[in-house]
Image (cartoon, grey):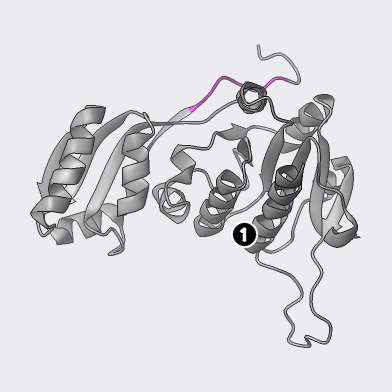
Amino acid sequence: MERPGREQAPQHTDTLVWGKNPVTELLKSGETVDTVYLADSLPQAVAGYYTALAKQSGAVVKRVPGNKLQKLCGTPDHQGVAARAAEVQYASLEDLFAAASAKNEAPFLVLCDGVEDPHNLGAIIRSAYLCGAHGVVIPKRGGVGVTGTVMKASAGAAARLPVARVTNLAQAIRTIKEHNVFVYCADLGGAPLSRTDLSGPVALVLGSEGGGPGALTRKLCDAAVTLEMAPGQATGVDSYNVSVAAGILCYDVLRRRTAQ
C-alpha cells in the first residue's frame, strides 16, 4: 500500500511528438525514442539531419508519404517530422526537489490545477523551463497530460523539464509546503503582483481556463496574487489567458532571482 503523503513511482506513457523543434529536443533529451517518421518530401539535408539524430538515440527511421504522416499526427502541422517516444516519463515531486538541490537553488515549481487545453499546458511548460523552474506539477484527473500537442506547443521543453503527474493536487500542495516552499495562487482576488514578493522558495498555482483554481486549492495556498490590467478596458475581457499569466509570473520569479 502507498504510504500517505507520498507520490507514486514515476509513470510512463506512449506519445507521438511532431514538428521540427519538438522532435529535435526529444531526440537530444536522452529519452527513449522508438521510431522517427520523416515525410518523403523532406529535403535530403533535413532528412539526413534527423536520420543522424535518430541513429544516435537508437531510433528506427521510416520515410512515409506526407498524407500518411498527417493522418498519423491528426494534423497537417507536422512539418514533415514526427517521433514516437517509447516512454514519456513523469517525475515525482521528490525528483523536482532533487533538481533544485542539484543546482543549489531554492525550489521553483509551477502547478496546473485543471488546465485542459494542451496548447496552454505546452506554453506554460515552455515559460517555466525558460524562466528556470525546476518542474511542473499536473493532476492525473481533471487536466491534460503530456501529449504530442503539448510537446509541440512547448517547443520541446516538455522533454527537458521534469513534469510530475500527481493523483491528488491538494496533497501535492501540502507536501510542497512541508518543504518550506511558499505557495502562491494566481487568482483575481489576490494582491497585485507589484506588491507581491515572489523571491525565495516558491510555487505558482495556475487554475483552469474557465473557473481558475479550485476552492480547495485556493484555501491551501499561502497567498493569492493577481495581475493588474489597464483601467477602462470595458471589453468584457476580465483576465489574462492562463498561459500568458504563467509567463508573466514565471518571468517575475526569474527577474528577482537574477537580480539577487
- The image quadrant where one finds the N terminus is top right
Question: Residue 96: percent from the left, percent from the top?
Answer: 63, 28
Q: Quadrant of residue 201?
A: top right
In this view of the protein, which residue sits in the foreground, 214 or 55?
55
Q: Quick one: label 1, few (<14), some, or many (20+) residues within 10 Å?
A: many
Q: In which quarter of the image is residue 99?
A: top right
Decide if residue 207 is in sight here: no
For the magenta stretch, what is the residue range?
6-11
Please tell me which residue is depicted at 62% across the width and 53% down the height of the picture: 115
Q: Is residue 65 above or below residue 82?
A: below
Residue 151 pos. (x, y %): 43, 48
Which residue is at a point 77% across and 30% down the rendered structure image?
176
| Residue shown at the point (83%, 59%) measured from the top left | 193
> What's under tag 1, amino acid-wise?
Ser
From the top left corner, tell me how far across and down residue 108 is, in percent: 70, 37
Q: Which of 118 and 48 is in front in this view?
A: 48
> What is the residue that sits farthest to the front in this orientation?
259
Residue that carries the numbered disc 1 in the rendered image: 243
Residue 32 is left or right of residue 207, and the answer is left
The residue at 84%/28% (across/down) is 180
Is residue 2 on the magenta stretch?
A: no
Q: How many marks?
A: 1
